[in-house]
Amino acid sequence: MLGDISQVDEIYIACGYTDMRKSIDGLAAIVQQNFKMDPFSNALYLFCGRRSDRIKALLWEGDGFLLLYKRLENGRFQWPRNEEEVRRITPQEFRWLLEGLSINQPKAVKKVNIKSVL
């Protein structure tokens, strides 16, 4: 289904800045060459420019790429600008990001890895 991101296995965020003039081919090349990842995997790749008011998302749907674009009319995305090249985020962190919140919520209750506790 067109743009059904609920079925993706993983969500990755490209930290830092991305040239927002890039199209599908340019973003797929970043995923493949810079991050050494497979753009044809069942993953959503997120990119943000310097202004932080727009994002692009790249998704392979099995028969072609889908490019999603969101521009905020008021406000900015809380985009991580640290030195990490690519970071995996959870669906909850993705929702926070789209709501204008930071993906690093210090007061959020974290899931416990039961194997590490025992």
Image: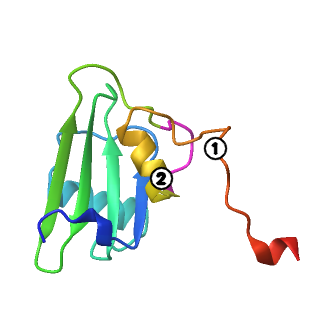
Q: Is residue 22 visible?
A: no
Q: Which residue is mark 2?
A: 92
User: Magenta: predominant secondary structure element?
Assistant: loop
Q: Is residue 36 visible?
A: yes
Q: How many marks?
A: 2
Question: Residue 18 lies in magenta, yes or no?
Answer: no
Tell me what residue is drawn at x 45 percent, y 32 percent. Answer: 78
Say what amino acid the circle numbered 2 marks: Gln
Q: 3 above or below 54?
A: below
Figure quadrant of residue 19: top left
Which of 103 and 38 lies nearest the eye of the viewer?
103
Q: Which residue is mark 1?
A: 108
Kindly state the secondary structure of the residue where label 2 is placed.
helix
Rendering colour mode? rainbow
Q: CA distance from mark 1 to mark 2?
A: 10 Å
The residue segment tinted magenta is: 80-87
Which of 75 and 32 lies nearest the eye of the viewer?
75
Q: Residue furthest front?
A: 109
Q: Quadrant of the N terminus?
A: bottom left
